[in-house]
Amino acid sequence: MLNQGILFLLDTVFGLFIIALLLRFYLQLFRAPYRNPLSPFLISLTDFLVRPARRVIPGLWGLDLATFLLAWAIEFLVLAATLWISGMPPYTPISLAVLVLLSAIGLLKQSIHIFMLVLIVQTVLSWVNPYSPVSEVLNSLSRPFLIFFRRRIPLVGNVDLSPLIVLIIFQLILTVPVAWLDSMLYGLL
C-alpha cells in the first residue's frame, strides 16, 4: 500500500516536471512566440535545472539539448526508481540499456500525448474563443503536424478535418509501434 502511494507521487510530481521540460523544449523548437502566458511559467519552473545543465550540455543547431536530456534523465530515474520499488532484481548492463530505451519511449509517449492535447484544446478554442492569447502558442505547436494535411484535405462544410486526421495518426502510433516496442523491452527486463 505504501509502495503504491510512493509510485503515485513519483509518477505525478516528476511526470508533471518532465512535461514542463518537454513543453519548454518544444516551444523553443517550434519557435513559439515568447510573449505568451505559458513560456514565462515554464521557464521559471524549470530554470533551476536547465541553467546549470546548459553550462555542461551545449545546444545543437538551435536545439535546447540540455532541456531535452534533462527530461530524458529524469524519465530514466523515475523508471528505475519505479522498477526498484516494484521489486526488480539488481541492475545489469543489459537492464540499464533497456531502461535507457524505455525512457526514450516514455518521452515519445508523453510528447505524443502533449501534441494530442494541444490539438484538442486548439480545436475547441477555435470554436469558442479564436482570439485567445493561448491560440498563437497552440498554433505554433500544432502547425508542423497539420500543415501537410491542411494542404491536401479540403474544408468540409467550413470545418477543418486535419486535426482529426492527425489525432487518429497519433493514436495509431501509440497503439501499434510504440506499444509493441514497450512490451518487447519490458519483456527483456
Image (cartoon, rainbow, N blue to C red):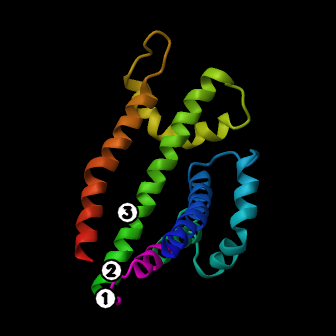
Q: Are marks 1 and 3 in contact (CB under 8 Å)?
A: no
Q: What label does residue 113 carry, if any? A: none
What segment is highlighted magenta in the picture? 78-92
* Pick the front one: 57 or 185: 185
Residue 146 in picture, x, y percent from top left:
46, 34
Q: Residues within 10 Å of mark 2 (few under 14, many from 20)?
A: few
Q: What label does residue 93 carry, if any? A: 1
Q: Residues within 10 Å of mark 1 (few under 14, many from 20)?
A: few
The secondary structure type at the circle numbered 1 is helix
How far apart are the alpha carbons under marks 2 and 3? 13 Å
Q: Are marks 2 and 3 in contact (CB under 8 Å)?
A: no
Q: Is residue 119 visible?
A: yes
* Pick the front one: 54 or 46: 46
Q: Quickly name the residue at label 2.
A: 97
Q: Residues within 10 Å of mark 3 (few under 14, many from 20)?
A: some
Q: Which of the image's four quarters has the C terminus?
A: bottom left
How far apart are the alpha carbons under marks 1 and 3? 19 Å
Above or below, 129 relative to 73: above
Q: Are marks 1 and 2 in contact (CB under 8 Å)?
A: yes
The secondary structure type at the circle numbered 3 is helix
The secondary structure type at the circle numbered 2 is helix
Give the mark nearer the N terminus: 2 vs 3: 2
Q: Is residue 85 magenta?
A: yes
Residue 53 in picture, x, y percent from top left:
63, 77
Q: Residue at x 76, y 46 (%)?
A: 35
